[in-house]
Image (spheres, rainbow, N blue to C red):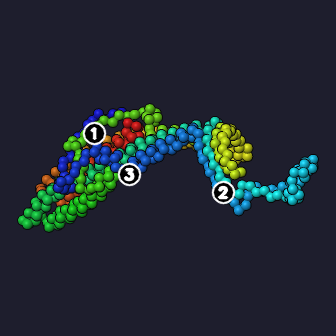
Amino acid sequence: MRFKTIIAITIIGCAVFSGNAQATYTLDQLKSAARQNNHALAQARRNIAAAGQQRAEAYTKYFPSVSATGLTFNANKGMASMTVNPSEILPSSLLPSLEALLPAEMLASLGNPINISMMKKGTIAGVTLMQPVFAGGQIINGNRLAKVGQEVSELQLALTESEVDLSTEQYYWQLISLRQKAITLQAVDTLLTGIHKDVDIAVRVGVAMRNDLLQVQLRQNELASQRLKLNNGYALVKLLLSQHCGLNDTTFIVEAPDCLVIEPVVYVNPGVALPSLTEYQLLGKQVEAATLNKKMAMGQNLPTVAVGAGYNYHNLLDNNRSFAMVFATVSIPISGWWGGSHAIKRSELQRQNAIDQMAEKSELLTIRMQSAWNDVNEAYQQILIANHSIEQAEENLRLNRDYYNAGITKMSDLLEAQLLYQQALDSRTDAYVAYQINVLKYRQATAQ
């Protein structure tokens, strides 16, 4: 379905909210400023950078790990000690030879035990290199999981950009709406000023009651109250827009085209648009991450194999000793399967939840697309109704003024007609703003 009718709504400049030397921003400029300065987008970009660092960290697991250790000590006594009795060690066949060679005092000392102490102090140092050969797929799946995390961060950034754009447009059109209502208020005030002048003259010449003049003055007081609320609302929305876009200034004004045209909106089949939605792609990444988490849980309960090489040094025996070695390690988590089997089952349940969540939210995304299309159609029809109502309200106001001047209707009827005219103008403004917002929501909902 397409809208073939193009309705132009002219919005003239409004001096009510104008100031001197004010910066002027178009909608596109505000969107650009918001994308550059918005805090939520800045956080999303940092999340992408953090995910990139995590992915780079996971990639390092493919390479060997190198570690160095060193130890020096000085104990209060030797860590290795023993007592040696030479007479027990020497063979009895050697005793005659020793008696001939050694003095009697030395031969007598061979029967006394000797205390030996070693490793009272020393230094140990080494460098080891370990290369994983098989880790149950944990390294590969860990890298895949890190990649998914980075992709999720990028999708989150796209989603945040859409939300920032929507908020920017909402603030923008709120300002346009308040400005247009101020223009309407000014036009109504001019109308009431004319009525007040006519009634004042009529009261003075005695052809109208003073009560009519009081009714006009009360209506003018209501307009003054409405103007105050509009000014306060306009200032508040400008403050919110300034913070949202990082402008650090509230003296700016927003620029609207001289002729605001309702462009046709193209209907998109929800089934065609669904795969392109950022939200749908995020759901797919959740399922992918849950699947990888299950594989990681399985890998934690598989054997791990690694090879390594090392170079070591020590002087524990009061001699400098250094040596190199190569080795292989195999680690089998035998008792780990008791808890590991439950972890695998838990991760499978989480994967099933992710699949179910994707199915459910896909249906909700489809419903959202249809609902957004209905909102666009409704807002479009409201504009048509509002335009028709303005024509009727203008004619009603003209007739009631003529009737009042002819003396065949009351002032309350004339003021009621004026109020209906003002409400019709405000309704058209609200309908146009609602249409613009709903069009953006529909385009975002259908990935246009």
Viewport quadrant of the C terminus: top left
**Which label lies toward us, 3 or 2?**
2
- In the picture, measured across the screen, residue 86 lies left or right of residue 296, that is right
Q: Position of residue 435 (x, y in %)?
A: 32, 44
**Looking at numbered disc 2 in the image, what kind of residue is underneath it?**
Phe
Viewport quadrant of the N terminus: top left
Residue annotated with mark 3? 39
**Which label lies toward us, 1 or 3?**
3
Which quadrant of the structure image shows residue 207? Answer: bottom left
- Label 1 – label 3 distance at C-alpha: 32 Å
The answer to which of 273 and 2 lies nearer the viewer is 273
Element on which disc 1 rests: loop
The crowding category of the residue bearing disc 1, from other C-alpha atoms within 10 Å (few below 14, some 14 to 19, many at least 20), is some
Query: Which numbered disc flags the more N-terminal residue, 2 or 1?
Result: 2
Which quadrant of the structure image shows residue 132? Answer: top right
The answer to which of 232 and 122 lies nearer the viewer is 122
**Looking at numbered disc 3 in the image, what kind of residue is underneath it?**
His
Q: Residue at x 29, y 37 (%)?
A: 263
- In the picture, measured across the screen, residue 204 lies left or right of residue 275, that is left
- Label 3 – label 2 distance at C-alpha: 55 Å
- Furthest toward the left, the residue is 205
Compared with 305, 219 (above or below) is below
Q: Position of residue 421 (x, y in %)?
A: 22, 52
Residue annotated with mark 2? 73
